[in-house]
Image (cartoon, rainbow, N blue to C red):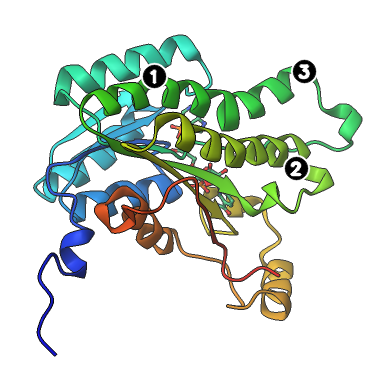
Amino acid sequence: MTASAGPGPGDRFDLTDRVVLVTGGSRGLGRAMALGFADAGAHVIVASRKIDACLEVADEIESRGRQALAVAVNVSHWDELDGLVERAYEHFGRVDVLVNNAGMSLLYGDLADVGEAMWDKVVGLNLKGPFRLTALLAPRMMADGGGSVINVSSTGSIRPAPFMLPYDAAKAGLNALTVGFAHAYGPSVRVNCIMAGPFFTDVSMEWDLEAFDVAAKQRHALGRGGEPDEVVGAALYFASDASSYTTGSVLRVDGGIP
Ligand SMILES: NC(=O)c1ccc[n+]([C@@H]2O[C@H](COP(=O)([O-])OP(=O)(O)OC[C@H]3O[C@@H](n4cnc5c(N)ncnc54)[C@H](OP(=O)(O)O)[C@@H]3O)[C@@H](O)[C@H]2O)c1
């Protein structure tokens, strides 16, 4: 058998000099992905509400020999998203990959206790913000020859729980945006989604970890929750040419929840 021509697997995942914008890049899965992109050669824009936390990740990225830009932004506020895009283009002149990762749920007792402000906050961050940021950035990616958008939803989007219903509904909406945007901005911009299962980030501080461990061992194929850096492989796949024939796809990265 002769060796095939063309790039090897390593080359297909290469992100040298691509510019990646990660919302919620300061902590948890976003931070892990931001560092993973930098290790694959990308320059990274780290965006979240707290600038000091973004600057820390930006420093780590620069210490790995890449360029980084930290931007303070509340993703649910559309007027702030215009500023984020401006900063990104002023600094780098392009954005090749957008990761709509910033997200959170809020705790409530009874569904009737979910007030309009709580609903707006959760849906604003998990659905409204990603919609607007994609609508702002994808046409510019198209004009520059193409790009990749990666949404981060949750397995709750297909297994909605009464105690997280606004969040799960917003994440189900994000799955739908993934397919719709893939058609809107294809073929040059691909849009995919990582449907995350339970990962040990700051959100897991709210969990009963003993009960989680028992349930995971009994029911999840891998028997455990994920570490943040275990999302990086899927993110590199969607960000890079490795996924050149994949768009509108929603990939479960959840340790095998039934
Ligand atoms: N961990 C899990 O088990 C799990 C499961 C399923 C899905 N997910 C999803 O995975 C994504 C990452 O979750 P994670 O566990 O890494 O969360 P995390 O550790 O709580 O980090 C959340 C990130 O989002 C930023 N953020 C929060 N609100 C924001 C806002 N309004 N505007 C801009 N940035 C904001 C935070 O920074 P600031 O505080 O500085 O704003 C932080 O960087 C989320 O979309 C989440 O829904 C996580």
Foreground pick, 87 / 115? 87
Q: Quadrant of the N terminus?
A: bottom left
| Location of mark 3 (residue) | 116
| Amino acid residing under circle 2 | Met
Element type where label 1 sits in the image: helix
Q: Residue at x 79, y 49 (%)?
A: 161
Determine which quarter of the picture holds residue 80: top left
Q: Is residue 57 above or below residue 201?
A: above
Q: Can residue 64 be seen in this view?
A: yes
Q: Is residue 49 visible?
A: no
For marks 2 and 1 on the same chain, the one whose residue lies earlier in the sequence: 1
For marks 3 and 2 on the same chain, the one whose residue lies earlier in the sequence: 3
Q: State left or right for residue 165 relative to residue 178.
A: right
Foreground pick, 245 / 21? 245
| Location of mark 2 (residue) | 164
Q: Residues within 10 Å of mark 1 (few under 14, many from 20)?
A: some
Q: State left or right for residue 139 relative to residue 108.
A: left
